[in-house]
Amino acid sequence: MGSKSNGHGRSGSDPRGSRLGRSPLSPGITIRSLEIFVAVATTGTMVAAAKQLQLTQPAVSQVVAALEASLGIALFDRSVRPPALTLQGGTLLKHAQAITDSIRRFQSSVRLGTAAQLPLLRIGMLNSFATSMGPYIIKRLRDVAAEWSIDSGFRATRLRTLVDREFDFIITADESPVPADVKAVPILTEPFLLIVPSSYDGDSASLKRLSGELDLIRFGRDPHLHSRIDRILQKHGVIPQRRYHLDTNEAVLAMVAVGSGWTILPPLAVFKSIAHGDRIRALRFPGKPFYRTISVVSQRNEGAHIAAQIRDAAIDALKEHFLRPVRKTMPDIVSQITLHGASAK
């Protein structure tokens, strides 16, 4: 009568299967033992593996033997010189390599804030910022991560997505309350402007008249910003005739350029169009100006080194590729723009 496994001993019919079914916490099966196994297999000998890992050859041999005992299989054929991988050893090698590679990537990710390259960096980036400054930031910081994922959709720059860890960092102008477990560092404060067709010859100082003659074209879906703009318009006695809601700056500005209406946007969203000679004009908002602040936001006490690099790259890009052209095309607006933590010169 054949013996049966009681869950604690090995099976009499298949000791190898029983050994493989043991807990992964078996003394012989550790991350270190898998690392040593991979080193022996890839270098060709235990001596070479020992040198690579800065261990002694007997120590390497002992770890490999313990791993084989725990698995219940021979990983190397020692009847040949140098020892060659067995069929089962070769099969398990790719899995061991996958485990050790994953552990190295995991350790790299844990070291956010060090010089180690990240396997993946996920950033939510404000649309107007992504299309104007994003390429310069990514080019400068390309070696920070092996792979980048940039999302410029409305939801991608909500503070909530950072709290929920859908992104590692966000560059945002989200006006909702900042949660206690994230840190927001401002980089740019800019005013909102009136954007009208270049053909418009009415009194743009009067929002009530402007709204009576042209339709308001709105950008985006930020409820906080829309509520703020509504309150400001109400103070000016403005009730827009008709409202268009569009999700891209380019679409909004194209409608303004053909004379379909007017809009309210900040300089970062319009400076390229004005520099290209599009048929629009940017004017100071009548009365008391109002602003938005763009910030780099990260988890509090996590990834500070990366956040600082993103912030520095963003400020340098803004100085070179935003403020300089704005001085030429919208000189009367520059005094209302604040670049935080850097000289505007």
Image (cartoon, rainbow, N blue to C red):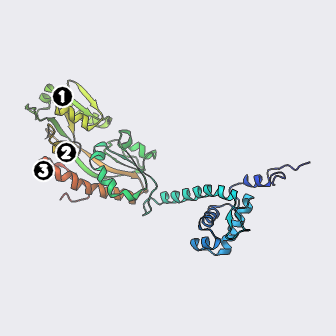
Return the x and y of residue 283 as percentages of the image width and height: 13, 40
Residue furthest front in the image: 80
Q: Quadrant of residue 39?
A: bottom right
Please say if the residues under marks 1 and 2 sit with CB atoms less than 8 Å apart: no
- State the mark number for residue 260: 1
Return the x and y of residue 224 as percentages of the image width and height: 31, 37
Q: On screen, 8 above or below 166?
A: below
| Cα gap from disc 3 to disc 2, whole angstroms | 10 Å
Amino acid under disc 1: Ser
Q: On screen, 324 above or below 197?
A: below
What residue is pinned by disc 2? 271
Q: Which mark sits nearer the N-terminus, 1 or 2?
A: 1
Amino acid under disc 3: Lys
Amino acid under disc 2: Phe
Q: Quadrant of residue 84?
A: bottom right
Which residue is painted at 58% across and 71% down in the image? 53
Residue furthest top in the image: 241
* Depth check, front residue: 128 or 189: 128
- State the mark number for residue 328: 3
Which residue is painted at 61% across and 56% down in the image? 94
Q: Which mark sits nearer the N-terminus, 3 or 2?
A: 2
Q: Secondary structure at mark 2?
A: helix
78 relative to 110 in the view: left or right:
right
Return the x and y of residue 153 as percentages of the image width and height: 36, 40
Which residue is painted at 61% across and 74% down in the image? 55
4 relative to 153 in the view: left or right:
right
